[in-house]
Image: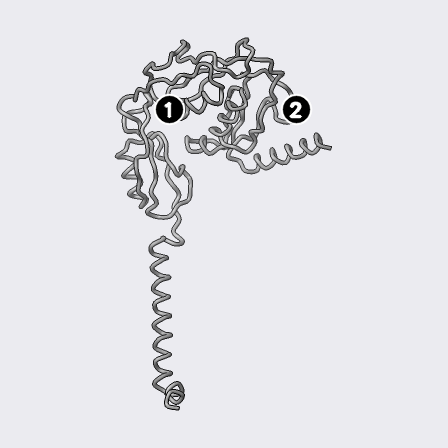
Amino acid sequence: MKSANFFKSKLFLIQIGIALLVTIILIWITLISLRWYTHHGEELEVPDLYGMSLEEAENKLESEQLKFSIYDSIFNPNFAPGSVLDQRPLAGSIVKRKRNLFLTINANQPEQIRFPNLVDNSFRQAYELLITNGFKIGKLEYRENQFFNLVLYPKYNGDTIHAESLINKGSSIDLVLGKGDNNGIIAPNLLGIINSQAEEKIILSNMNLGRIKFDASISNHSDSIQAKVWKQSPSFTNNQKMRPGSKIDIWLTRDSLKLQRADSLLQKRLSTLLY
């Protein structure tokens, strides 16, 4: 009986009110803290650091209330040591204050790596070995051989390179491959992807990247990285079979309307082919 009276008493109601008030205050403080900790609603555009010295990049990021870490270093003789050669997220990306950027800088001197054995491997195996060891894929050449895409020998600066040779990390390696009895290859669809993705897709389709053309929407390095393919030659839709090692030219833009029109035209052509 006393318990029932207590739950109806003024003291109990006051205690309930205080508990609810404390709970509301704690929830409010938690939400405010989360907003502060995550910088909710604060958006910044990542600046373009390409080619800047590390000191210039650090000052720029500090003024923008951003942070950075050095992710990797590669050697490019066209830039001063310590220059920024790549950044992630890319310039123009929208991030929150205090976001950490990962920078690739130019090394003081090239790192030398022992070249892997590629001879008699498949092209795909050679591709993975080269990328894993920090090399780039240059030109694909095809020679008479009964096995399609068998690596006959790799080339560096126009000369044959042998396994265990020391060469600079990041070097471009050409591959001479077996022609086999391949009857021809249809160009891959490159529409709407960025330059680096297009180059990779072309190489993995056993072809070579030809000319790269930028339109008027490209005004700086950041634009060129983020630009997307709106046209290619040969086209994906003409069913033209090409010899392995053939070149594909691409046109790049940042104009979203041009990309939409190109995609719409592609869909029409595909529907015509299907029906």
Q: Which residue is mark 2?
A: 238
Q: Is residue 30 left or right of residue 141?
A: left
- Which element type, helix, strand or loop, lies under badge 2? loop
Q: Is residue 96 left or right of residue 107?
A: right
The amino acid type found where label 2 is placed reads Asn
Q: Position of residue 62 (x, y in %)?
A: 28, 43
Tell me which numbered mark, 2 or 1, is placed earlier along the sequence. Answer: 1
Q: Nearer the viewer, residue 83 or 204?
A: 204
Q: Nearer the viewer, residue 77 or 12?
A: 12
Which quarter of the figure has residue 153? top left
Please identify the residue farthest to the bottom as the structure is shown: 1
Q: Disc 2 or disc 1, which is closer to the eye?
A: 1
Residue located at (33% from left, 22% from top): 76
Say if 1 sits above or below 28 in the image: below
The amino acid type found where label 1 is placed reads Asn
Q: Which residue is mark 1?
A: 133
Residue located at (35% from left, 69% from top): 25
Say if 40 sits above or below 176 in the image: below
Say if 7 sits above or below 229 in the image: below
The local crowd at label 2, few if under 14, some if 14 to 19, many if 20 or more residues have their Cα within 10 Å, is few
